[in-house]
Image (tube, rainbow, N blue to C red):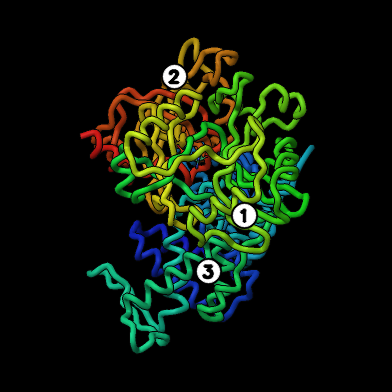
Amino acid sequence: MEYKKLVDLYEKLFSTSKRLEKTYHIAKFLKNELERENSEVLSIIFLMLRGRIFPDWDDTNLGFAAKMAIKSITSSSGLSQSQIESWWKELGDLGLVAEKAMSKKKQSTLFTNSISLQDVYSNLKKLSEQEGQGSNDRKVKLVNQLLTSASPKEAKYIIRIVLEDMRVGIGDSTLRDSIFYSIFAGSFDYDFKQNILNYSSSQLSKSSSNDSFRSEIIVSLQDAYDIANDWSIVFDHAKNGISDLEKIKLTIGKPLKVMLFPKAVDFEDAFERLGKPCAFEFKYDGFRMQIHKDGNDVTIFTRRLDTVTEQFPEIQELVNKNIKADTCILDAEAVGIGKDGRYRPFQDISQRIKRKHDIDKLVKELPIELNIFDILYLDGKTMIKESYAKRREALTNIITTKKMRINISEQIITEDISTAKRFFDKALEVGNEGLMAKKLDAPYKPGARVGYGMKIKGMKESLDLVIIKAEYGEGKRAGWLTSFTVACMDEDGVLLEIGKVSTGLKEKDEEGTSFNILTQLLIPLIISESGKEVTVKPRIIIEIGYEELQRSQTYSSGYALRFPRFLNLREDRSVDEITTIDYLDKLYLEQK
Ligand code: AMP
């Protein structure tokens, strides 16, 4: 397929902020390409639509910095580096700079080649594979190859995708609905006045209305995605008819998104949402592990679905010795534990996720206890549709618990508020963050914050926000980034600013997360600079405390924080897990 076709689609998607309009454009595009392209091309389309070449669960980076993009644009346009840099200052977006530079070049050469989607994909893939000496130069060359034959518009998106800065804002629900319209609606159109997609379906059965037909299929598509974790696989099966989706099976070794939990205001709220009785469990303050056991092979994924198996040899051993199953997928929390049996906060053991050397030493110095709280797959059977009560029972049957090493999450089942409150006090006493309340008859819903479980925390609320801009300090702090603009997210993954943070970081590295440490993490992520301010790729998540949430016109989220302060670096979190605007709306109401 010509890359140009995807670029035309990007242009349409960027021209609107309306979700339904985006859905319409993607659905039209898929419908046209559906007959023409093979599965391989379709899978590239689904990935690149969202501005990445790897699926969500694969955290591989391209490692292409702004400075390298400048080199590429300079050499492929034949313009001077100072010209490119000055446009960068003026436009603040290297994608736009590439577009401008290539259009200047095109005026002087009449020659154009077309590039294919596969060319772009294969060069980007090679980018991620470059390692060691000279790798940056090789990466620049790979991008040059693309830019040299690209049109100005193509160049814009090539630069944005290599910088991993597409920000196209397409959520799962948009892709799911687009698939629905492209396959199951015989004809459909966008009605600009009513803001809806009118459609008719050739497959509509006599007994059902458009609405119920649509919602039935949407549920099937979503269920299939929960298992496949990849929209191109869902699309590929759906093409053959809705019943083909049932052929999609969970695969050991390929991670599923983890289920997320909203916050309960209090115990009454939890009972109201989850029913009576419900389960209450310790909310361990550690890190989440999705553990896949295949015979004696154990693979461990973080909640961001990065593989961390090698960092945790003791967990591999514990699972192999104490879980009676040939194959299974477990959901668990690994928490630091002191000699006195009290739990330690996440920050104390966070280095265990990243450190790849001296692992045996760390295993001894920072011991962890594995608390398993769910099971998604057991000996050939997918468990996610089973009730929580059934899953817990299955878990109890296969685990041999060992004190301070491997446990099933501590739980009570009650309908009585004072019993739940006593359990909450006990949880805090031994060093937990609070409780998780869980609905006994609910299935497991990957990736969704559906409210089949709710967290009840002891501390004052904090937010997980992503840094999108930062500013250099002055005087003693010159050379460090010292003020950080943070953002939350809307349902389509669009980042919305909520304020600036500059307190809570340390002056010296020995004291904890310092200005210097955060600066070093952010520098490779810089995508543009303007005076003292830099814009960075949205990768670094920080936990922020504050006194009050206020309405504000200053920031795009419509909110501002009074007295925000840095609490922790959350290297275990990914951008799609940051605080959502819906949640802020709820907090704001609660606060009132
Ligand atoms: P939060 O990180 O505040 O959004 O709370 C949700 C997280 O709590 C989950 O992602 C788990 O990592 C963690 N957690 C700790 N204990 C449990 C438990 N018993 N059940 C589920 N999640 C738990």
80 shown above or below 36:
above
> In which quadrant of the rendered image does the N terminus lie?
bottom right
What type is the residue that disc 3 sits on?
Answer: Lys
Instruction: Report the front residue among 342 and 101.
Output: 342
Instruction: Report the front residue among 160 and 488.
Output: 488
**Residue shown at 71% from the left, 35% from the top:** 311
394 shown above or below 205:
above
What type is the residue that disc 2 sits on?
Answer: Gly
How far is disc 3 from disc 2 in space, using C-alphas? Answer: 48 Å
Bin the neighbour count of mark 2 within 10 Å (Cα to Cα): few under 14, some 14-19, many 20 and up. Answer: some
* For discs 3 and 2, the disc positioned in front in the rendered view: 2
> In which quadrant of the rendered image does the C terminus lie?
top left
Q: Position of residue 295 (x, y in %)?
A: 76, 54
* For discs 1 and 3, the disc positioned in front in the rendered view: 1
In terms of sequence position, does the residue under pointer 3 or pointer 2 come before the other? 3
Q: Position of residue 445 (x, y in %)?
A: 48, 56
- Residue 364 in the figure: left or right of residue 268: right
Numbered disc 1: secondary structure: loop
Q: How many marks on residues?
A: 3
Question: Where residue 504 is drawn, which disc sits there?
Answer: 2
114 shown above or below 453:
below
What type is the residue that disc 1 sits on?
Answer: Phe
Q: Which residue is mark 3?
A: 5
Q: Which residue is mark 1?
A: 54
- Residue 413 in the figure: left or right of residue 557: right
* For discs 1 and 2, the disc positioned in front in the rendered view: 2
Q: Quick one: which residue is furthest to the top in this view? A: 476
How far is disc 1 from disc 3 in space, using C-alphas? Answer: 20 Å
Q: Position of residue 314 (x, y in %)?
A: 73, 35
